[in-house]
Every structure is written in structure tokens, then in C-alpha cells.
Amino acid sequence: MDKKVKILGAGLAGCEAAYFLAERGVKVTLYEQKPVKFSPAHKNKNFAELVCSNSLKSMREDSCQGMLKNEMRHFGSIVLDTAYKCSVPAGGALAVDRDIFSELITQKVKNHKNITICYEEVTSVDTDELTIIATGPLTEGKLYESVGNLCGQGMAFYDAAAPIVMADSIDMHKVFAASRYGKGDDDYLNCPFNKEEYEAFYNELLNAERAELKSFEDDLTVYEGCMPVEIMASRGAETLRYGPMRPVGLIDPRTGHRPWANVQLRCENREKTMYNLVGFQTNLKFGEQKRVFGMIPGLENAQFARYGVMHRNSFINSPNVLNKTLNLKEYPNIYFAGQITGMEGYTESSMCGLLAGYFVWCKLNEIEPQLPELTTISGALLNYITTPNKDFQPMGANMGILPALENHIRDKRERYMALSIRGKESIEKISLDF
């Protein structure tokens, strides 16, 4: 069989699939519309652009994200390998300098002898060609219509990004460096609130003016994992204190006590010249962001390198249209990968790209693929997006999607570690020695 594959989209999933296949001798043609055309949320001309956060989340073995990283590692993830090479301090999380990250992946993909890059906007899908569609949740225009024709009516939710501030504009006398419970090397800057400061901030946030969403025709449906902070605040005065402004595990050195509330800032680059407001995704008007977020202790005179934005994310009704091998039931040559399938998150999208690459390789070589077991995060997510569900919504990695242990362990940390060990043993059953 002629080993050629077309891949649409050079995001995380597309790059993973392209590199996985190219490393195994498949001739890949990778289509990317940037820099010919940019979506409303993309700014960087390079591949694998991280639009929202710069964090790939926890590295702990006893976490769902740690489990997923083990599974990505087993498949030879280019995203994970690159992330470690350009990581920035983030406590127990894997955060990256997003510009270096994208540049390194771009060069590695472009320079592969088996990958040909086509910079153009693809507007249709040929169902006779072996194709992986990894165009992401911002798929739009004629391609969106073509995908809709193949899959039926698409769905959408709204995603949001947090603001980034310049380090030299932060009042270092009011913030302190620390990671929760002492994990990491004081990798976060913390902006502590007393009760009065928090209440004043909360009231202004609750009443701040939001940007209009005139360009979007759908009703506003917000993904829980990227909930705008102002919408979260509308759920009650204590919601933020148990969410992105939780003060647990921190001691304010000025008072010797735990703050009433706290905002954490995570460095965006290795030089630590920019910081991201952790968990502060927002759709407030830019002027309102400067005014309200300027009430955060230490950010009174903050200069914004990027204001928070909200954009529409689209995904297919995967349970209705996809096989367990990520190809369409009606058009088996057409595979999907990444967040467009409903696997929500950076690492989840990357893993989905690896799985799509693996399934395509099996097809090319007429090999029966080994599905990852439900005891793995990737297997559980794959099962979730391909199992009938009338209320299907995107899902990120979490321990709740895994089957319970045979012998229940009461201690949460010990239970999660046992789940992680079981998952690692499961993923290693998939042979990649082709």
C-alpha cells in the first residue's frame, strides 16, 4: 500500500500525528493556513501555538495529567519532549516559554525528510484520500462547512484566555514568591488579598462590562475548564476563593497568616519578563480588565502584554460519527484528531494526535490496532468521545473517567498513585515495534 497521508492543521494534534507517521516512513503532507490566514485567536506564525495558557499542567505521577504524560511518552510525543526542553518554573506543573516551544516544534516538523509543508487554506475534504483532520476548535469558513457536511451539524462552546502582564510593572513590594505547600522553587508570584480588598475587587468584577459577542451566532455555552472569571464570580462570592483565588497552602510573609484570597502569577517565558494571571480567563472589555485587575494587590500599575479574550470553539458530535479508531463511520479514510473531537486540553489534544497517527499507521500496514485500555487516561477519553451521549460536551483528563480499583483505597493520594501505576502498566501493553 502507498504510505501517504494528508494532515490538515499544524497545531498540537497535527504535529504529533505528522511526526509519529513520518518517523515510521510515511510520506506526510501537512497543510497549515498560517501565515496565509490567521484565526481570530492565533497570532504566532509557527506551528503548535499555545493560545490560552502556557501550562501543560501537572507532572505528578499521582495525577491524571501525570498519567497522560506517561502515555504520551510511550508514543514518543514530540510535544512532551519539546515542552521539557523549553520549560519555565511552575511548581509541580509543566509550563513552557510558548514562543520557544512553537519555534522548536516548527523546526523539527519542517526539517523532517518525510514531511512536506503546504501553507494554504484548505476548503474541502476529499473522502477518497487518507486524511487526518486536526484543524482544531477554531475550524471555520468553507472547511467548517465541509466538515459539517461529513459529520452533520457541528456544535460550539466558548473558550477564554487569561491576561499577561509585564514583570517590570508589578509592585514587588506587595507580592511574594511561593508555590502552594512549598512545592517547586517559589515559582509563582502571589498577590494576597485581605477580606476588605477581596470584597471590593469582587463587587467591581461582578459589575464590570463584558465585551460583546456579536460575531457569534450561537448561544453562549462556556466550557467549565476555561470558565471566564467574571462568570465564575456570578455564581457566588465564595466561588473564586475556592477556585482560582484560593489561598490554601500559602502564607503571606507580611502578616504571617494565610491570605483571605490570592491571585497567582505564572511566568510566561524563561527571562521572566511576563506573567500570566493564573485562572483569570476573561471576556471583559480591555479597559475594564485594566481597571478591575488593577485592584489586585501588586498590579495597580500593571502593563498588559496581552488582554484576556474569548473565542468560539467548535467540535464534532464524535459519539455519533466516529469509530473507536477516530475515523468516520461513513467515510473510513477520514480521521479526526485533537480538540475538534471533544478531547479538551493541550495534552489531551496531543495524545489524540498520537492515537490518530497510530491508527492510520495500523491501517496503512493492515494491522489490527490495540485500543488503549479504559484504565488509561487516553483510553478512557477515547471511550468517552466515541460512546453515545445525547448531552456530549468536551472532556479533559480527570480521574473520574477511570474505572475503580478492584480494592478500594481510602487515602486519595495513595488511590491516585495506584491508578497511575495501573495505567502505566496498561499503556505499555500497546506495542509500537512495527
Image (cartoon, grey):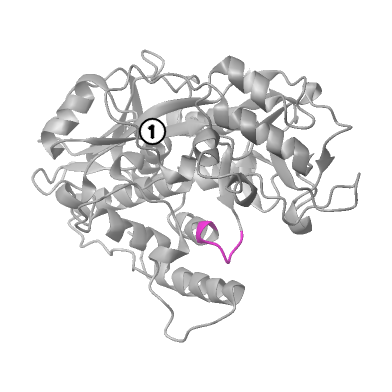
Say whether residue 409 is left or right of residue 136: right
Residue bounds of the magenta highlight: 60-65
Considering only vertical position in the picture, is 222 above or below 260? above
Is residue 48 visible to the viewer in this orientation of the structure? no
Q: Position of residue 26 (x, y in %)?
A: 29, 42
Find the residue positioned furthest to the top.
36
Is residue 150 visible to the viewer in this orientation of the structure? yes
Count of residue discs:
1
Of residue 226 and residue 141, the one placed in the foreground of this image is: 226
The quarter of the displayed image where residue 311 is located: top left
Q: Where is residue 251 in the image (x, y as percent from the top left)?
A: 83, 52
Residue annotated with mark 1: 158
Report crowding for label 1: few under 14, some 14 to 19, many 20 or more residues within 10 A (C-alpha).
many
Q: Does the magenta stretch include residue 51?
A: no
Say whether residue 102 is left or right of residue 241: left
Identify which residue is drawn at 35% across, 57% down: 381
Of residue 116 and residue 360, the one placed in the foreground of this image is: 360
Considering only vertical position in the picture, is 39 above or below 355? above
Of residue 59 and residue 411, the one placed in the foreground of this image is: 411
The quarter of the displayed image where residue 401 is located: bottom left
Find the residue positioned furthest to the bottom.
407
Considering only vertical position in the picture, is 288 above or below 346? above
Identify which residue is drawn at 24% across, 61% down: 369
Identify which residue is drawn at 30% across, 17% down: 120
Q: Is residue 61 magenta?
A: yes
Q: Where is residue 90 in the image (x, y as percent from the top left)?
A: 69, 45
Q: Where is residue 299 in the image (x, y as percent from the top left)?
A: 75, 26
Question: Mostly what secondary structure, the magenta segment?
Answer: loop
Q: Residue type at mark 1: give it.
A: Tyr
Considering only vertical position in the picture, is 371 above or below 392? below
Identify which residue is drawn at 58% across, 64% down: 61
- For label 1, the SS is strand
